[in-house]
Amino acid sequence: MKISIIADNRERKSGIPEILIKKGVSLRLLQLATGDYIINESIIVERKTSQDFIQSIKNGRLFNQCSGLRKTGMLPLIIVEGNPFEAGSKITAESIKGALLSVTLSWQIPVIRSSGKEDTANLMILAARQRLNPPQFIRNTGGKTRVKRTNIHYFIGNLPGVGPTLASNLLTHFKTIENIVLADIIDLIEVDGIGKKKAEFLYKFFRE
């Protein structure tokens, strides 16, 4: 499987294009009007450091970028390097959570956290592989439905302590994000892979 990525030429100084090339990715540097990376002409990625993510919330640039990503018609993805809740900003945790929920629910754009540049490169390669060989419950749908369920799967899988397998179990059981968020502890425990402790954690997470 050959992975082809177009990187915005301003990303050269980040060192990520060089990392991708070393990992065997076919990479081109171009001036992109929207996003920082385009993976296999189907996934568009906006990369942000945690500090940049916070700043984009403050000045409203984040939501303009979401609009631009959506208009491309490609599957959008935002990767945040580091923990925005520990970025040393005066912005409240509630404001950060609100922005994350707006991006994932209103704009239907998954936000994935990475630990650094190497992890960001690995995430883009993983995204390319999953796009070419999606999970079974996504593969059986088509067109816009498949894109929508892929977005939802990314969002659920990025919740604390969830991951892709449990995300699939949650979506199979509850069908929608809304049902997952509104579920009580007893309902969450019924999902394969969720015990009482994790059910209590998710229940509190959605309400705090």
Image (cartoon, helix red, strand yellow):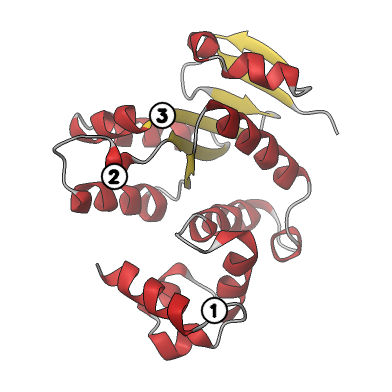
What is the CA distance from the residue labelled 1 to the residue labelled 2?
26 Å
Can you give x and y, in whole percent of width and height, for residue 167 in the image?
A: 57, 66
Can you give x and y, in whole percent of width and height, for residue 80 in the image?
A: 43, 36
| Mark sitting on residue 85 | 2
Q: Mark 1 highlights which residue?
A: 194
Based on the displayed image, in which of its 4 quarters is residue 7 positioned?
Answer: top right
- Depth check, front residue: 103 or 124: 124
Q: How would you rate the neighbour count of disc 2 (Cα within 10 Å): few for under 14, some for 14-19, many for 20 or more?
A: some
| Mark sitting on residue 175 | none
The three-letter code of the residue at mark 3 reads Lys
On screen, residue 93 versus residue 204, left or right, reads left
- The residue that appears at 40% across and 81% down in the rendered structure is 183
In the image, farthest residue toward the right? 1
Q: Quadrant of the C terminus?
A: bottom left
User: Please, what secondary structure does the residue beneath circle 1 have?
Assistant: loop
- The residue that appears at 57% across and 82% down in the rendered structure is 191
On screen, residue 96 versus residue 182, left or right, reads left
In the image, farthest residue toward the bottom? 186
Q: Mark 3 highlights which residue?
A: 48
What is the CA distance from the residue labelled 3 to the residue labelled 1?
32 Å
In the image, farthest residue toward the left? 90
Q: Is residue 151 above or below residue 123?
A: below
What is the CA distance from the residue labelled 2 to the residue labelled 3?
14 Å
* Mark 2 or 3: the one toward you: 2
- The residue that appears at 50% across and 86% down in the rendered structure is 189
Q: How would you rate the neighbour count of disc 1 (Cα within 10 Å): few for under 14, some for 14-19, many for 20 or more?
A: some
